[in-house]
Amino acid sequence: MKKITSLVLALMLSLSVAACGSKDEPETPETPGETPVETPGEEPGEEGLTGSITVQAEEGWKAYYEAAVARFLEKNPDASVELKITGAFDMLDILDSTDPSNEDIADVYAIPADRLAGLNQNEALAPMDAKAMAEKIGGFANYDAGLGGNFNVDGDYLAFPMNIETLVVYANKANAEAEGIDLTKSIEMNEAGLNLLIPMFDAWFGVGVLNSSDIELLGKNDDGTLFSDFTAEWADLAPEKQATVTAIFEYWKKTQETNASLWDAEAAWGILDTEFTTGGTGVARISGPWDAGTFTTQAGENLEIMPIGTVTVAGKPMKHWKGGWGLAINSRNEGDDEKMALAEAFIVELMNTDYAVDFFKGTGKIMENVPADVYLSSDLSDQEKAIIENVLASYQDAPARPLFQEWGSVWDTWKNAVLSWSSVKPADAEAAYKEIKAAFDAMMLNF
């Protein structure tokens, strides 16, 4: 249920001295970052807002958030905004173990999109007037068609889009040359073998491989019933999906033949870093923009960034998810007109598209509603521009990330199934698939 105060806020914003007149609805874009950015109007009205809120920010985000607070308080001198400097997941862990009334939980905090269902079930999120906020910020041609629509639960908008994210390919040019791999062409997983570094047991990375043939680890039908492609018999699995499972099995075989630790949930991460370092055998690995600094240390000037579809699996391009983060308002504020108005208005300032480049510099996050050329024509480094360009390219072809709560069961189900191969030692892909099917059959019994 939307708050009356949200409507009051929207009215205040519309009366602002710099508010714009009504505009025609623009065409709906397919790709984020193609919509012209509108200049946010002055906000709020002459009298400004009052009250106080706390806002969660990670240590690395502190400088950007402090600048946003300063801008906001200049317009609202009678308001107070206090930053709680802590990791987003750290705060969510506290929330999970207590409740929204805990004062250690901020009034405004960042959430990954996949946590929305659980937080909503725990009644931790206050509905906000996101459409009015989006209109004020600008750049959203069709708010519901993007990340904002994913935050809509039964008509209530429970978070506001903070950033979009997906995985890209990082390559080491020196290692590629030494291993005879041409980075101007696609990298086929079946041919690259262990030159391609993927912690396959971790579904976060594994879905990049599985999505190449549209394998649904856990899906939901229109009537709400759940299904998994991995409950099918091997003979009934579509040929392209069999080919993907076969590619994963062949990859596992190579780890066993070479005694590589890539199938060890503990040791794999060290192997990934060692082999990707210049002089190692690792040519390419997949990850998000947050790992660019680490990979730059490992590869130095040899680092190259490419769309995730550069890697193919049995001829089909890898795809990850349309992922992202949102800004949520603590449910304890629902019914508190002053705090809700202040929280919504601060989010508007925090996501001010005039500062999109500063937002990326300060958080490493890419705004959904800002066109690529804003970033590419800025003073960002060539590497930062390459990250943004390739994230946007990879995001375009990615499927939506499943956000329903039951999907959380997939993580361990997939991990345990594929790690079991090292003890079971399946003779072929069909035998390996039996372990996957058994695990997913058991998982489905819980729903």
Image (spheres, rainbow, N blue to C red):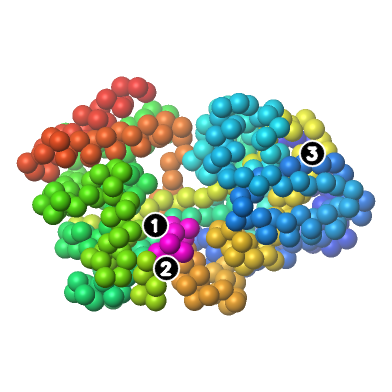
Q: Find out whether the residues at labels 3 and 1 contact each other: C-beta distance under 8 Å.
A: no
State the SS at label 3. Answer: helix
Residue at 33% over, 34% down: 412
Q: Residue furthest right?
A: 47
The verdict on residue 235 being magenta is: no
Looking at the rendered image, the disc whose residue lies closer to the viewer, 2 or 1, is 2
Residue 236 seen in the current view: no
- Where residue 229 appears, as percent x and y from the top left, is 27, 37
Q: Which of the two labelled residues, at mark 3 and mark 1, occupies the earlier sequence position?
A: 1
Q: Report the disc number at residue 287.
A: 1
- Nearest the viewer among 69 and 27 is 69
Q: Find out whether the residues at labels 2 and 1 contact each other: C-beta distance under 8 Å.
A: no
Residue 15 as seen in the image, left or right of residue 62: right
State the SS at label 1. Answer: strand
Q: Quadrant of the N terminus?
A: top right
Residue 447 as seen in the image, left or right of residue 331: left
Q: Quadrant of the C terminus?
A: top left
- Return the residue at label 3: 339
Q: Which of the two labelled residues, at mark 2 and mark 1, occupies the earlier sequence position?
A: 1
State the SS at label 2. Answer: helix
Measure the C-alpha gap from mark 2 to mark 3: 43 Å
> Callout 2: 10 Å neighbours few (<14), some, many (20+)?
some
Looking at the picture, which amino acid does disc 2 mark?
Thr
In the image, the segment drawn in magenta is 287-297
- Return the residue at label 2: 296
